[in-house]
Image (cartoon, rainbow, N blue to C red):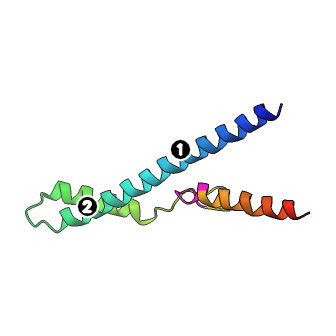
Amino acid sequence: HFAAIFLWIMNDLVLDAVFCSNCERFYLTVEEAQMTCIQLLKNVTCPKSQRHLYKDVLYANRCFTKMTACGLFTIDAMLPISCIGAVGYYALVLLQF
């Protein structure tokens, strides 16, 4: 019974780490797209249709925020590390009793 619970917890932690990693890659891609659009807008020979597209991308990214879990914490690369820290902290507190 203990092994099944342990495997379930480990599976959950692995899935959380994969999800957070993918979210972090998404955030980096959005930031890279924004920087690329800014650089391409500085090009004076850029066609008007492309300039309009770049401005639309920048406008869409203006209100971009990181995903949160019900507003309690952000979903990013630091989430698994903070979860491990919280579990370790509470394990130490429980060991004192």
Secondary structure, magenta segment, majority class = loop
Foreground mark, 2 or 1, reads 1
Numbered mark located on residue 76 in the image: none
**Which span is picked out in magenta?**
74-80
- In this view, the residue in front, 73 or 83, is 83
Expressed as whole percent of the image width and height from the top left, the position of residue 57 reads 32, 58
Q: Residue at horizontal 46%, vertical 61%? A: 64
Q: CA distance from mark 2 to mark 1?
A: 29 Å
Q: Circle 2 sits in a helix, a strand or a loop, which is it? A: helix
- Image height of 32 relative to 20, above or below: below
Q: Quadrant of residue 39?
A: bottom left
Please rate how many residues cluster around mark 1, counting C-alpha atoms within 10 Å: few if below 14, some from 14 to 19, many from 20: some
Q: Quadrant of residue 46?
A: bottom left
- In this view, the residue in front, 63 or 39, is 39
Numbered mark located on residue 37 in the image: 2
Residue placed furthest toward the right: 97
Please rate how many residues cluster around mark 2, counting C-alpha atoms within 10 Å: few if below 14, some from 14 to 19, many from 20: some
- In this view, the residue in front, 29 or 34, is 29
Expressed as whole percent of the image width and height from the top left, the position of residue 8 reads 72, 36
Q: Earlier in the sequence, mark 2 or mark 1?
A: 1
- Image height of 17 relative to 52, above or below: above
**Which residue, given by chain and number where applicable, does mark 1 sit on?**
18
Q: Quadrant of the C terminus?
A: bottom right
Q: Residue at horizontal 12%, vertical 57%? A: 47
Instruction: Give the residue type that dot 2 points to.
Output: Cys
Q: Residue at horizontal 57%, vertical 56%? A: 75
Expressed as whole percent of the image width and height from the top left, the position of residue 15 reads 59, 41
Q: Quadrant of the N terminus?
A: top right
- Residue 75 sits inside the magenta stretch: yes
